[in-house]
Image (tube, rainbow, N blue to C red):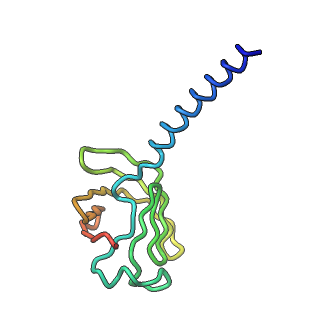
Amino acid sequence: MKAALIGTAALVAVLAAVATDAGDAFAQAPPYVGTWASRTAQCRVGQESQNAPLIMRRDGYDQHEAHCKFTSVRAQGPAWAVKAQCMVEGDTQNMDLVLQVSGNRLTIRDEAGARTLERCR
């Protein structure tokens, strides 16, 4: 009985350690996650407005009537190559993006060019 309890306690300790390590890996969000805007005042605008800030998640983003789900995210040095499937004002679009964070700035590159946004606080 005592050996079984010690074995169970050891198994619980191992599982807890594995869960903690996995949790840390999943808890660490990429630096691009957050709310971003072209100017500080935009940070206070609600998503119902055309001038809404960009809300970036690990797996996609939302901005007013644009909603994107990342289908692929690949680290490329200090940037991420992203394939996204987006719904923009009811129209489905596939997009290729490059995201790069430097300090409190996020640069998003796509076929139209690059735009740089500031992190909202």
Look at the picture and state if 95 lies above or below 24: below
Between 59 and 7, the one nearer to me in the picture: 7
Residue occupying image coordinates x 47% and y 63%: 68
Count of number-bearing discs: 0
Q: Pinpoint residue 102: horizontal percent, then vertical percent.
A: 22, 59
Q: Pinpoint residue 16: horizontal percent, then vertical percent.
A: 57, 34
Q: Pinpoint residue 24: horizontal percent, then vertical percent.
A: 46, 43
Between 50 and 88, the one nearer to me in the picture: 50
Q: For the C terminus, give its image quadrant.
A: bottom left
Q: Quadrant of residue 5?
A: top right
Is residue 36 rendered to the left or right of residue 77? right
Q: For the N terminus, give its image quadrant.
A: top right
Q: Residue furthest front?
A: 2
Look at the picture and state if 49 lies above or below 88: below
Q: Quadrant of residue 116?
A: bottom left
Q: Pinpoint residue 17: horizontal percent, then vertical percent.
A: 52, 32
Residue occupying image coordinates x 47% and y 55%: 59
Look at the picture and state if 118 lies above or below 72: below
Look at the picture and state if 21 lies above or below 63: above
Residue occupying image coordinates x 27% and y 80%: 39
Q: Residue furthest left?
A: 102
